[in-house]
Image: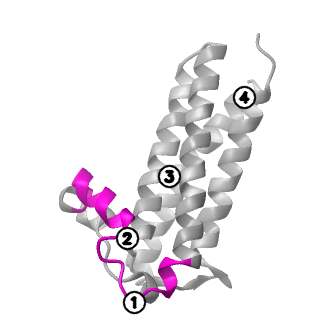
Amino acid sequence: MKRADLVLGAIALGGPAAVGAAYYTQHAWNMQPCPWCVLQRLIFLALAAAAALALVWHSPLGRRIGALLVLGFAGCGIGAALWQHFVAASQASCDLSLAEKIIGALGLDARYPDLFMAMTSCADAATKLFGLPYEFWSLAMFTLSALGAITVMAQPKR
């Protein structure tokens, strides 16, 4: 198996695993999500879909396009995690934030409220998991995904 397949497979599985972990902490530990948390869930799933696309598109061009999509989604996730930590967490309300508008426009909060409905404000959702701000865990996953995508794109054509 090629290294690119391993990297893309890890990203394709890592996205749903991150969403599953967030879902678990929401329901088992009562860590309710804010709009930016919910948006990061969506980005993780989009990132995983892009990695899966790259895995099934068995050509150098397909790998690069899929990896480029992964890189783009990872960049969006990095931005969302940083925005959540440095801006949204200090605001009393997330009403009409970009995150809320995107989730609402897609109708995900209405279709899948258990997974995509924001349950609290960004300031109230600011919490730590194992000593680190929750959004830094997302930031780490998005950063690793971006590095993985860069690795795939940097491989020589065959």
Name the residue type under label 1: Ala
| Residue at which label 3 appears | 44
Q: CA distance from mark 3 to mark 1?
A: 26 Å
- Name above or below for residue 114 compared with residue 123: above
- Image location (x, y in percent) of residue 80: 52, 63
Q: Which residues are magenta?
A: 87-109
Q: Seen from this angle, which residue lies furthest top?
A: 158
Q: Quadrant of residue 114?
A: bottom left
Q: Which mark is residue 153?
A: 4
Please tell me whether mark 3 or mark 4 is closer to you in this view. 4
Name the residue type under label 4: Met
Q: Which mark is residue 35?
A: 2
Q: CA distance from mark 1 to mark 4?
A: 41 Å
Name the residue type under label 3: Phe
**Residue 14 showing in the rendered view:** no
Q: Quadrant of the C terminus?
A: top right
**Left or right relative to 44: residue 75:** right
Q: Earlier in the sequence, mark 2 or mark 3?
A: 2
Please tell me whether mark 3 or mark 1 is closer to you in this view. 1
Label 3: few (<14), some (14–19) or many (≥20) C-alpha neighbours in 10 Å: many
Q: Earlier in the sequence, mark 1 or mark 4?
A: 1
